[in-house]
Every structure is written in C-alpha cells, then in structure tokens.
Amino acid sequence: MAPKKENPTVSSINTLNEHIKSGNFSRIYLLTGTEGYFISQYKASLIEALTTPGDTMNYNVFKGEKVRAEDIASAISTMPFFSDHRTVLVEGTGLLAKASDTLLDVINSVPESTRLIFVETEVDSRTKIYKAIASAGTIARFETPDPSTLNVWVKRILSSEGAQVDDEAVYSLINAVGQDMNRLSNEAAKLRAYTIDRKRITREDVNIICESEAENKVFAMLDAISVHDSRKALLLYSDLEMLKVPPMQTLALIRKRYLQLAQIKMMQKDKEDNASIAKMTGVHPFYLKDYLSQVKNFELDQLIKSAEMCADADLDIKAGRTTDKNALETLILHLSLSSDKS
C-alpha cells in the first residue's frame, strides 16, 4: 500500500505563522494551491507584516499576464528608500509557467534588501524555476484540508470571539456549506454575530442562520418520495417556497442529491470504504450515516432515472414548455409514483 500523501496546508500555515511571528522572513515566497481562501489570507498577512501603510516607495505590485520578467528584475534591483527592505508582489502573471531564463536569473539574484512574493494557483514543481524558489525561499502550498483539519479550523474560527462551540455545530456547518473556506468563513461570522449575547454556538443556530435549510428540506423530501408520500413531499416543497428558495435552485438540489446517492450506491457496489465514499462525494463523515441510510431506499437504476427526470424538467422550464413551479410539482408527483425499488 502506498503511503498516505500528506496535505501540505498545515505545514505551510505553521511555517508562515512562524515567519510572521519571528520577523525572520525568506527573500522569496511562492503561495500556491487550490485553496484560494488561505492563499488570500496569507498574502494579506505577509504584505501587512512586510510593508508600512502608505509607503508606496518600497512596495511594488505586478498583476496580470502583461507583466514581463524584466519589470520584476528592475523592481528587485532597486534599493529601498529609508527602509531595510523592499517588498515586491507578483500575482497571477503566469510567468512561472513560462520559465524564462530572465526570470530564473531574477530568482537566483534576489538581494537581501528585497522580499519577493509570487502568488500563482498553478505551478509545475518539476521546473527549474520552482526548484530555484524552493532552494532560495519558501513555498507555501494550500490545498483543501482533510476532514479532521477542517473540523479544527472551523471550530477555531467559530470560537475566535470566546464562544463555546458544540461539535455538532461544526459538523452541521461543514455539511451545510461544504468545504469552500470562503463560505465557511462568511457563515461563521454570521453565527458569531447571532450568538454574541450568549457565547455558545449550537447545531440549532447553524440550522437557523446558515444556508442549510434548503438542503435539509430536500433530504426530507427524498425520504418522503422513497415511501411514495407525495403529500409530504409537496408540503416540503411548499416550505422551500416559504423560505424563498427559487424553484430552479430546488430542482438543482434534488438532482444533486440523487447523483450523490447514485455515486454512493456505485461505490458500495465496488466495496469502497466509508472514508473513500465521504471524500469522493463531498459528504462530511459525520453525516455519511444519514446518506447510507437513505440510499438503502433506492436502487441504482432508479437513482439514475430520477436524476434524468430532473434534467428533463430543467429542459422543459428553459424551453418555455412549462413554468418552474408546475414543473417542480409535477416532478415531485412523478418521482413519488416511480420510486419503487426494483
């Protein structure tokens, strides 16, 4: 069995935090990876630590694909003005992918008086430039955290103003929002504001404040559909209307749930373990048991057929053959009638 590949996010966070705390900075930084939230946060933290507000003489910013390696070479070679260093930010230029000799020379000749920060979402670790940055500076790679790391991070931001946080609130928030850390951060801010007077955050608070109610209703709707209870399913759809959830969003949520359940069914057929199922479907491990229970009520072909019916309803609405409300109500009735297990 191949060794588990470690997520680099934690070590990157620890390294940058230590640099910022100690004031011992590398001459070159590369912030990269798929997790834009951390890239944005640590870019801001480095800039704050390395620059003085309003000091435009010692801070250069290069953004976009029109930036040339020669521009950066000129900036890093300019001596700082009444400061011990100059900070140069190079973001989203694509220069690292071009791997020019000029840029390689720039990286190999960054003076002690310069702090050069590259921000690129995609880089090739096999290139000479990448290896030169790794040798001369610090590469911080941010990927989506694994479930346990994400749980810790969410609990930390929820409790950042002193609130006591129930573990179920953490699980509920991740299940509602997913692993998009910008959304998690935004929803956490809402929860902190909502609970500021009592300093405790519970699962109930998440259900009230966060954008999870629609998905919860859809989950219950599929339970009703699986036992042919069209009346309850339609009542749940009425609840979604009361919540002002657009019909097209409801349709998308229903189809998404059927596709997730189909994926779970296929992975179970392939004898995949629950950890793999949770990772591949994007379902938080804490809530996987609910999905595993619900999927027992359906056969694979029925799940696929139901997802196709959702897609057909979407086409009918967009083609103007029916209204979105009528399409949803008809779909729910048809799904309830056709949900027998084969």
Image (cartoon, rainbow, N blue to C red):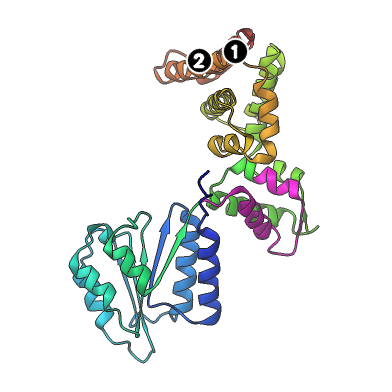
The alpha-carbon separation of the residues under discs 2 and 1 comes to 8 Å
Picture quadrant where residue 227 is located: top right
Q: Amino acid at mark 2?
A: Met
Q: Amino acid at mark 1?
A: Leu
Q: Secondary structure at mark 1?
A: helix
- Residue 292 place in picture, x, y as percent: 67, 27
What secondary structure is marked by label 2?
helix
Which residue shows up at 61% across the image and 48% down it?
Answer: 147
Tag of residue 335:
1
Would you say residue 41 is visible in this rendering? Answer: yes
Q: Which mark is residue 93?
A: none
Magenta stretch holds residue 256 = no
In this rendering, would 70 be left or right of 211? left
Q: Which residues are magenta?
A: 144-173
Of residue 66 and residue 104, the one placed in the foreground of this image is 104
Image position, residue 265 (x, y; %):
58, 23
209 above or below 156? above
- Whether the residues at callouts 2 and 1 have beta carbons within 8 Å, the answer is yes
CA neighbours of label 1 inside 10 A, class few (<14), some (14 to 19), many (20+): many
Which comes before the other along the chain, label 2 or label 1? 2
Say above or below: 10 vs 245: below
Percent x, y for residue 125? 34, 58
According to the image, label 2 marks what residue? 309
